[in-house]
Structures are given as structure tokens and as C-alpha cells.
Image: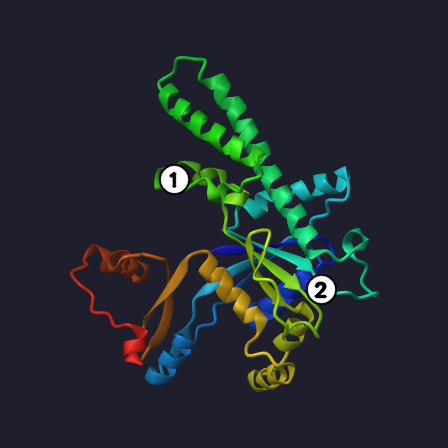
Amino acid sequence: MRAVLIGPPLSGKSVLFAAVAEAGGSSVDISRGDLPHLAVVKVPDERLDWLAELEKPQKTTPAELEFLDVPGIDMTDRASRSRAKAHWPAIRQSDMLVLVVRAFTDDSVPAYRDRVDPEGDVSELMDEVLFADLEQTSQRVEKLERAVRKPTPRRDEQMRELELMKKLLAALEAETPLAEVITSDSEIKLLRSFAFLSQKPALVVLNCSEEEASQPGPEQLHRLSCLRLSAKIEEELARLSPQERAEFLEDLGLSASAGARLVRACYEAMKLVSFFTIGPDECRAWTVAVGTDAVTAAGEIHSDISRGFIRAETVAFDDLK
């Protein structure tokens, strides 16, 4: 599963990506400057840490997420918007959007549009997301309207799709994200190949100053859940040893790294959960979707376990602890 970081230029997005990648055990050469960058990051989980202490296995394997960093999305003029469109295919291939916006003031770093306006930046980014889906949906409606004029074996199927696409088009024209419109399993299955941007889960990251990192911030922006952090702090934390990191966080009045909270927030926003297997050889977290049954989960370990499934004895983590 993949989360993509998008944001205006100079929002601190790439600094945050580098910090999350380094802290999460991924090696990415940010110095090369060529985007996009992809990092595989370990999902922090205190339960897995406790199980590893209990069993003391030879190997501990956490769950993982991919993070993608694309160039800043500049919406100041037509040429910049055109360049940004080149990155939509990579963004569409991701499973979640993380909107990184600037909430810090620094005279040495020019501000996008010469102002620091997190709410305005989020609104602008979401407008671009909706417009990209609107453009894609409009093209599909036009194509289907031409196709249904001909009597073909697929005409009834195309008519049903056209009706659905018109519903989506009306929602997008009303500036409604498709996540609020596409609800049934049949619709989700039919539209999966389109990878609509506004259908994906999304999270806002407010990149604030070091002084404001421990202060409470808004829980939502533009109806999206909001996480407040300082990319500069996360960059410094990523370079410290675990002991030094804990001391630094205590000095700042923070209970945990915001980077770790970001990874967990993305994991949960994509409706993913972990189940664990423990033994002397390996203690491992396996990733499944929320609501997955035991037979399907067993298939994540090995397809033979799922095919030959009889029963599974499980225990809740809290009960075991």
C-alpha cells in the first residue's frame, strides 16, 4: 500500500519525506534531487515490540508502507499547472493522499504565493484533485455517450456505467469528493480501474515551526483529518539514536515522533490492521484490510494455509499481555 505526499512548492514536503524514510529504515538519496522518490517504511507498533520481547525470536518483521514524494504542485499559472499534470498518473497509482502544507514563517525560505495560508493551500490542492477527476469523468461520459448509440452486445453494460458516471460528474461539479458518493461495493469494483483521486483517503499535514510543534492544532482542515508536525524536527530526530531521540522528544515536550504518528495515521486511514504470528524463528506483523476474516488472513501467510483451512486458534493482544 502506498501513500503519496503532495503539496505546494517549499512546503517542506520533501524534508518530511526524507525524515520519515530515514527513521523508517529506508535508504533514499534525496541529494540527487530527481523526483519522484519512493521509500518503504516500517510501521511502528508497540504490540509487535512487546511480542518480540516476550518470544525473543531470531527475527522481527514489522508491517511496511510505501511513501512516494512527487514534485511540488505549483498552481500559480497555466504552464505550472500543465507541468503538475504530468505527475497525476503516479499519484493515481497510490492508495492515499497526504497533503503537506506550510504553517511556518521563515524569511530565508520564500513562501508559496508570498503568503503562509495552510487553509488556502489545502483548498487549492483539493480543487486541483477535484478538477483532475472532473476532467477524467467528463472524457469518459463523452466516450460512453458515443458508444451507446450503437447496438452492441455491451450496450446495456455501457448504459449502466454511463448512468453512474453522470452521477459522479454531477457530484464533482458540485465540488463533492467522490469518496462521499461512491459507497456500494459494486460501484467501488466497477470504478477501481479509474483510480479517482478524490475517492482516495486523504490526510492533511500542517508543517509548523519547531516552537509550535507541541502546541494543539486544528483537528480538521477542509473536512480532512489534520496532523500537526515540524518537518525540521523530524529531520533532526531521524539522525539520532533511539536513546537520543527519546531525550530530544522529552526536551521538546513531545511524547512520540510525529513521523511515527504520520505512518500510523496513514496505515489506519487506508483501513489497514495487523495480525501477528510469533515463534522462535520470527515475530511478524501481517497487513490485512479491516474486517478480513481468518481464512483470508491465513492466505497472507501462505496460500496453502488458506486452501487447507480448518480452524485457527487466536488470542487478543490485550488478553495475552
**Marks 2/1: CA–CA distance:** 40 Å
- Callout 1: few (<14), some (14-19), or many (20+) C-alpha neighbours within 10 Å? few
Query: How far across and how far down the image is residue 160, in percent?
Result: 39, 26
- Callout 2: few (<14), some (14-19), or many (20+) C-alpha neighbours within 10 Å? few
Q: Which residue is mark 1?
A: 189
Left/right placement of residue 261 relative to residue 11 reads: left
Image quarter (top left, top right, bottom left or bottom right) of the C terminus: bottom left
Left/right placement of residue 50 relative to residue 83 reads: left
Mark 2 vs mark 1, foreground winner is 1
Observer-nearest residue: 278 or 160? 160
Residue type beneath disc 2: Ser
Q: Which one is earlier in the sequence, the residue at label 2 or at label 1? A: 2
Question: Which element carries disc 1, helix, strand or loop?
Answer: helix
Question: Which element carries disc 2, helix, strand or loop?
Answer: helix
Query: How far across and how far down the image is residue 92, in percent?
Result: 54, 45
- Say above or below: 208 vs 82: below
Which quadrant of the view contains residue 255? bottom right
Q: Which residue is mark 2?
A: 31
Left/right placement of residue 107 relative to residue 70 reads: right
- Say above or below: 251 vs 178: below
Query: How far across and how far down the image is residue 129, in percent?
Result: 60, 43
